Image (cartoon, rainbow, N blue to C red):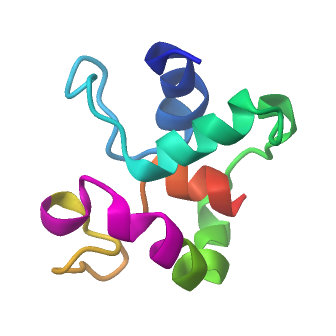
Amino acid sequence: MTKSNFQDYICRPYCAFFRDGQKEDLACRGAEAASTLVDRGLVKVGSVPVLEKESLVWERHKDALAARVCRSCPFFAEDCDFQGEERIEDAEPCGGFILLAL
């Protein structure tokens, strides 16, 4: 799947950090993992529920996904407010993390 395709179904709908035209050559580890699952047919894009921000669905999966996804993410050390070394309270995860949690 191409980068622009997963931006359409991961980044735009789920990621608070995504900005069209900025850092388009970069992807978070969560987006890469979710894209791989879609490419392999293990996740159907149309079957992923619409995110309701109030649900904080990612909180239930925070520890498991952090160990498997976040630690190897290129944004973890310097750019991640959610799981990075300098966490910010009430920060949202990246779109890939949210999609994986859903």
Asked if residue 28 shows in the view, the reply is yes
**Is residue 72 part of the magenta span, yes or no?**
yes
Q: Position of residue 15 (x, y in %)?
A: 45, 45
Q: Is residue 36 left or right of residue 67?
A: right
Asked if residue 92 shows in the view, the reply is no
Q: Residue furthest right?
A: 47
- Residue displayed at 67% across by 51% down: 51
Q: Position of residue 77 (x, y in %)?
A: 17, 67
- Residue displayed at 27% across by 33% down: 26
Tell me the quarter of the picture where residue 27 sits. top left
Tell me the quarter of the picture where residue 56 sits. bottom right
Q: Position of residue 24 (x, y in %)?
A: 28, 23
- Residue displayed at 55% across by 26% down: 6
In this rendering, the answer to whether 7 lies above or below 75 is: above
- The quadrant of the image that shows the N terminus is top right
Q: Position of residue 39 (x, y in %)?
A: 70, 28
The residues colored magenta run 66-78
In this rendering, the answer to whether 46 lies above or below 102 is: above
Tell me the quarter of the picture where residue 70 sits. bottom left
- The quadrant of the image that shows the C terminus is bottom right
Q: Is residue 93 left or right of residue 53?
A: left
Q: Name the dominant secondary structure of the magenta segment.
A: helix
- Residue displayed at 77% across by 32% down: 45
**Is residue 84 part of the magenta span, yes or no?**
no
Q: Is residue 81 left or right of residue 59?
A: left
